[in-house]
Image (tube, coloured by chain):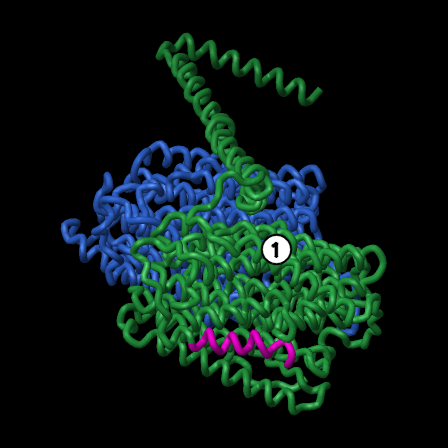
Chain colours: A blue, B green
Amino acid sequence: MNLLTSMGALPLLGALLIALLPAANSKLIKQAAFAVSLLVAGVGFAAAFGFDKSVTEFQYVERFAWIPALGINYQLGVDGISLILILLSVILVPIVILAGWNESENGRFSVKTFYVLILILETMMIGVFAATDVFLFYVFFEAMLIPVYFLIGGYGSGERQAAAVKFLLYSLFGGLLMLASIIGLFVISGNQIGRTMDIEALSTLQIDATTQNFLFLGFFIAFAIKAPLWPMHTWLPDAAKSATPGTSVLLLGVLDKVGTFGMIRYCIELFPDASRTFTPLIIVLSVISILYGAFLAIGQKDIKGLIAFTSISHFGFITLGIFAMTSQGHSGATLYMLNHGFSTAALFLVAGWMISRRGSSTIAEFGGLQRVTPIMAWSFFIAGMSSLALPGLSSFVSEFLVLVGTYTRYPVAAVIATFGIILAALYILIPVQKALHGPTTPGNENLPDLNKREIAAIAPVIAVIIFLGFYPKPALDIINPAAIDTISRAGFSDPAPVVGGNK
Amino acid sequence: MTSENLVYFIALPLFSSALLMLLGRKADKWGHIFATLVSASVFVIGAMEFLAMRDRPEESRAVTQKLFTWISVGSFNVDAGLLLDQLSIAFVLLITGVGTLIHIYSIAYMSHDRDRRRFFSYLNLFIAAMLLLVLGDSYLNLYVGWEGVGLASYLLIGFWNQKPEYATAAKKAFVANRVGDLGLSIAIMIAFANFGAVSFIGIEEKVGGASETALTAMGLMLLLAATGKSAQFPLQAWLGDAMAGPTPVSALIHAATMVTAGVYLITRSNFVFDNAPNAQLAVVIIGAITLLFGAIIGTAKDDIKKALAASTMSQIGYMIMATGFGPAGYAFAIMHLLTHGFFKAGMFLGAGSVMHGMNDEVNMRRYGGLAKLMPITTITFGLGYLAIIGVPPFAGYYSKDKIIETAFNAGGVQGIIFGSTALLGAIITAFYMTRVMMMTFFGNKRWADDAHPHESPFLMWAPMAVLAIGSVASGYLLYSGKAIVNWLAPVVDKHHHEHTELLPPIVVSALAVTAVVIGVGIALAKYRGELSATAPQDVSIFTRVARRDLLQDDANEFMFMRPGQKLTEVLVKTDDKVIDGMVRGVAASTIGSARGMRKMQTGYVRNYALLILLGALAAFVAILVVTL
C-alpha cells in the first residue's frame, strides 16, 4: 500500500482499535491513542526523508477510480507545500494528546470518544492536504467538520455548544459556495477535456474571465472563512475560547491552514487570471486582518481570545505573502503556516495549563507566575517571543520573508503591514506583564509548575521554534521548489532589483 | 577577504547563558564566576584578534566567516556570516572589555540577590547579541543582534519585575525599540528591492546605481532605527525609565554599549548616508535636538541614575550629530563613543557604589558630603566627571572637542548653528555634571537616618579604577597621531575626503574650554551652599517642565497611547456589535424564517397541493422567461 494512504489510514485504524478497548480503562485508551499518533508521525518523517526535493511534481502519487461516471478519482500526492503541512499535522497530534492528557475527562461524551474523534480528525487532516482530486479534497474538507464539531461541543468549556454551531454554520456556508464552484468546474471540464476532477488537468482549462471570477470567489470565500480573513473571522475567537486547548491547537494550528493552503493549491493554480483580478482586494483584506487582529488581541481580557486574535493577525501575513506572488512571499507564507502552527501550539498549550491550574482564563487573574511557576512562565514567554517574531526564533524568518517579498511588488502594503510588529510587541508583552510579572496574585502562591509529562510535550515544540529560527533550511528546501513553481505557473516572476549588477 | 574563525565571539557567551538558564538553581554557586570567565575569555580572543589585525597590512585587515546559509528563497540569499574589520573590532573590545569589568563588579553588587545566576545569564545573552550586532555581515544578521540586545535589555530592566513599575519600564523600552525596529525592517526591504542584496558588501558595490530618493528613504529608516535603540528624539522616552534595571546594567547596556548601537548603525551604513545628503542633514538635526534635550533634562533630575541617563542621551546626541557630518565625523563619533564608554560606565558604577553604601537611595538630595567616607568612589567618579565635561587632557576633551570642531567645519549657516548648539550643550553638560558632583560628594550631609555610607569592596572599586584610567588616558591615545582616524579610514573614509576648516582648531578648543568654565562656574555658584533634603517646589515653569522630562511621556500619552487605547476599545466593541452582530442577525433571521416555514407544514394535503401548484406555475413562468 502506498505511503500516503497508509499514513492516512493508520489513525482511522487506530480509532477503530480504540473503539474496541474497554471504556473503563481510560489510561490504556490514552496510551493507545498516543502510540498510534507517534506511529503516524513516524510514517510522516519517513515520507519527508524519501521526498525528492529536486522535482516539483507531486510525489507518492496514487490513483484509483472512485466514481468513474463523473471522472472522480481517489487520488493522492504531495508537493513540498502539502508535505510540510502534513508533517505539521502529524507532529502536533501526539503533542496535543500528551499535553492535554486529562482534557478528555470532563466532556459530555466518554474519554474513548475523544480519542476516536482526534484520530479520525488526523485522518481527515492528512487527506485534505494529500488529495489531488478536487472532489476528494471537498469530501475531506467537509468531513473534517464533524469531529471538530463534537470536540468543541462535547469537551469544551463555556458556551461550547453555541460556539460549535457557529463554527459549523460558518464552515458549511463556505463549503456550499465551494461546492457550487466545483460543480461549475465539473461542467466546464466536461465540455473541454472530458469529465475530471484532477487538479493538474483542471489547471489547463480555458475559462473566460467572468466565469473564472465567480468560480474563484466560491473557493476563495470558503478558504477565507477557514483561514480566517477579516471580516469573516468572528467564529474563530468563540471557537478558540470554548474548545479545549488541544482542540484549539489543531483548529488554529492545522485546520485553519487548510484555508491558506487552499488559496495556494486551488485559487491560484486553477484560476490564475481571477487571482490576479482579486489580488488588490485580497492584499487590502490581508493588511486589515494584520492590524485589526493585532488591535483586537491587545483589547482582549481572555487569554484564549487573545491568542485567537493574534492568529487572525498572523493569517493576514500569510495571505499577504501568498498574494504578493513573489517567491519570497510564497515560501515565506508556507513557512509561516508551519511556524505559526508551532508557536500557536506552544501558546495555547501553556495557556491551557495556566488556565487549568488557576481555574480562570482571565489574564488579570494571573500575576507573578515567573516566581511561582518558572518553567511554565518561561515556556509562555518563549512562545510569546515567537509569536511577536523575535529574530532567532522561527516566526521571524517567515514574517520577514513575507514582508520583503511583498515589498518588492506592493511597497505600501508591506510598509503598513510592518506596523504589525509594533502591535505584536504590545499584544504579547501586555499579557506577559500581567500574567508573569508583578507581585504574585493572592491565590496563586501554590500553583504547581509543569510536571514531567507537560515538559515532555512543550520541549519539542520550543526546540523546533528555536531550531527553525536559526536554521530554516530543511523546511525551506522542501517548500521552495513548490512555491516557486506555483507562482511561475500562475504567470508571475520576481521583480528584478532596481540596480542591476554583475552579482 | 580572508576567512577566519569568529564564531567563538557569539557561541561562547550564548551557550554559557543558555547553560545557566537550563541548569537553574544547580548553578547558583558558580554561575557568576563561570559567566565572568567566559566574558573575560572572549575579551582575550578579541584582544588577540586586534593585535593580529594591527600587524596585517591595511587592505587585508578585515576578515569574514560564512557560518551557513541562513535564509535562501529565490534571489533573497542571506548567509549567517560574520565580518570583523577595523570598526567592529573597536566595538568588540569595548563590549567585552567593559563587559568583563561589569561582570566582576556585579559579582559583588548582586551578591545578596537570590537570582544572581539568572542576572549573569542575561548579561551573557546581552554580550552574545551585542557582538552579533557588530559582527554581522549583513543588515539581517545585524537585525538579529539588534533585537537580541533589545530582548536582553528588556529582561534586565525588568530583572526585578515583581515591582509593577519596573515591569512597565521594561515593556516601554521594548515597545519604543520596536518602533525603531520598524525602521530597520523597512530599510532592509528598501535595500533588497533596490540592490537585490542585504549584505553590507553587496549593497556597497551597487550603491552608485541607486537613486537618491531610494537612498534617502533608506537612510531615514536607518535613522529611525537608530533613534529607537540609541534613545534619540523622538524615541528617547524609554531610557530614563530603563534605570529600573540593576545599576551594572545601566552602566553596560544603557550607557556604554547597547544605546550606542545607533551610532554604529549609521557609521556602518556610511555608503548609504554619504550618498544621501538630506538623510545626513536629518541625522545632524536629530543629534542636535537630542544633545540639548538630554542635557536640559539632566539639569533637573535629582535621581542620580536618571541624571546620568539624561546625560547619556545627550552624549549620544553628540555622536549621532557627528555621524551626520559624513566621513569628516564618523571617526570622531566612534572616538567619543569609546571615551564615553569609559567615563560613563565608570560614573554609573560609581553611582552604584554610592547606592550600595546608602541603602539603594538614588535621590541626590539625600546624599551630600560623601567624599570623606567614599574616597575611592569620589576619585574615580571625579575623573569620569572631568572627562565628560571636557577638561583637558581628560578623555572627553579630545573627543567632544573634535565633534564641536567638525560641526563648525560643516560651514555656512549650518556650521554656525550646529557648532553653537554643540557649544551650548557643553556649557549645560558642565553645569549638570558639576551639580551631580556637588550634590553627591560635597556639601552638607542630608542622609536618611538609617544610612551608613561606606566604601565599596575591592571587587567593585577595582573595575571603577580601571575605567577611571580609561577616562583619563583613552582620549589622548585615540587622538594622538590621528590614531582612530587613520585606523577607521579604510571603513568610513575610503576616498580620503579633504576636510575644510572654518575655524582654527585652537579657537574651537578655547571656545570649548570656556564653555566648561562657564558651566562649572554657574553650577558652583548655585550648589556650593547648604542644600535642603527635599526638592524646592516654588520653581519656575521651566524647571517643572524639565523635571517632567520635557513632557516626553505626556506627549506620547497624548499622541499615541490614549488614541491607541481608544481605538482598541472601539474596535473590540465594533467587532462584537457590528461584524459579529451582522452574523448573529443573519442567524436570527434564519431561525425566524425557519419558524415561518415550519408553519406551512400543516399536515393538510390540500395545502400541500396548493403549494405544489404554485411551485409548478413559478417554474413554468421561469422557463418561459429564460427561453423567450
**A138 with respect to B106 (left or right):** right
Q: Main secondary structure of the magenta part?
A: helix
Q: What stretch of residues is rendered in magenta? A: B462-477
| In magenta segment, residue B473 | yes
Residue in the picture at 56% in, 70% down: B341
**Which residue position holds label 1?**
B522
Choose top left, top right, bottom left or bottom right for residue B221.
bottom right
Instruction: Indicate the quadrant containing the N terminus of chain B: top left, top right, bottom left or bottom right.
Output: bottom right
Extreme-top residue of the structure: B606
What x and y, as percent, mark residue A91? 38, 61
Residue in the picture at 45% in, 81% down: B40
- The answer to whether one can see residue A486 in this image is no
Choose top left, top right, bottom left or bottom right for residue B362.
bottom left
Q: In this view, does A293 lie above or below A39?
A: above
| In magenta segment, residue A170 | no
Amino acid type at image mark 1:
Ile
What x and y, as percent, mark residue A263? 57, 48
What x and y, as percent, mark residue B235? 59, 51
**B150 with respect to B50 (left or right):** left
Extreme-left residue of the structure: A24
